[in-house]
Amino acid sequence: MKLLTICFAVLLLATFARSYLFSFRAQAPEDYSGTGPDFVLTKHLSGEILSEGVIFGPDGRMSNSFTARMVGDWNGDTGTLSEEFTYSNGTSQSRKWHLRLGPGNSFTATADDIVGEAQGTVSGSTVRLSYEIILPERSGGHRLTATDWLYLTEDGVIMNRAEMRKFGVKVAELVATMRPVQ
């Protein structure tokens, strides 16, 4: 029984180490300082943006895909990012982020389906945004913890990857592109 307990403890420790040290969650903004091109919120989240993406469920299979039309508008240190989503399952969704630049490379964001304020950090060619989101009732109305990473490429395309978790367990992942409409 003692050996079984030790094996279980080692398994738990290995799972914890993998989850926090060798995965998507292990990234930190400092990992990308000095990378380029520099992500400038007021520039790269401004004007019309077209996004296309997929959402994966807890089993790793694609559960939905979407297109979104976004419009970013800035006035000094405050801005909005309006999003109009059309999903492959026939549903649609609107969201309007209210962004406020903070000290250093920090910013905050709010939206109707976000609990409190999302906390953001810009570092080199990346942006990390952490928040709690409440899903629409048709999607279960769950309250999830989300970590969103945006990666700016040389040609101005933004790659977006996000994980959503409930009770620390990954329940969804989003992968999308965001490109300025020319």
Image (cartoon, rainbow, N blue to C red):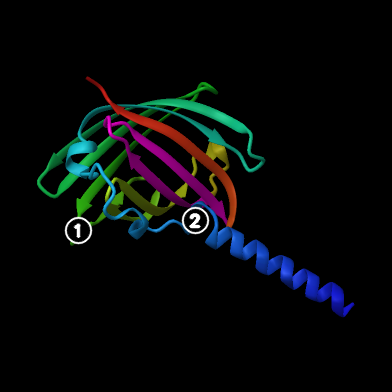
As drawn, which residue projects farthest toward the left? 76
Q: CA distance from mark 1 to mark 2?
A: 24 Å
* Residue at 49% from the left image edge and 56% from the top image edge: 25
Amino acid residing under circle 2: Arg
Q: Is residue 151 magenta?
A: yes
Question: Which numbered dot is residue 102?
Answer: 1
Magenta stretch, main secondary structure class: strand
* Residue at screen point 62% across, 64% down: 16
* Mark 1 Cα-neighbour bin, 10 Å: few <14, some 14–19, many ≥20: some
* Residue 91 point in image, percent of width and height: 49, 25
Label 1 or label 2, whichever comes before in sequence order: 2
For this view, does 91 lie left or right of residue 75? right
Which of the pair 59/17 is nearer the observer? Answer: 17
In which quadrant will I find the C terminus?
top left
Q: Is residue 145 above or below residue 97?
A: below
Kindly identify which numbered label has been placed on residue 20. Answer: none
Q: Residue furthest right?
A: 1
Report the residue at 28% width, 53% height from top: 123
Which residue is at a point 53% across and 42% down the rendered structure image?
A: 173
Q: Position of residue 97 (x, y in %)?
A: 29, 43
To which residue does mark 2 refer?
Answer: 25
Question: Is 131 situated above or below 72?
Answer: below
Question: Could you tell me residue 29's position as x and y percent?
Answer: 35, 57
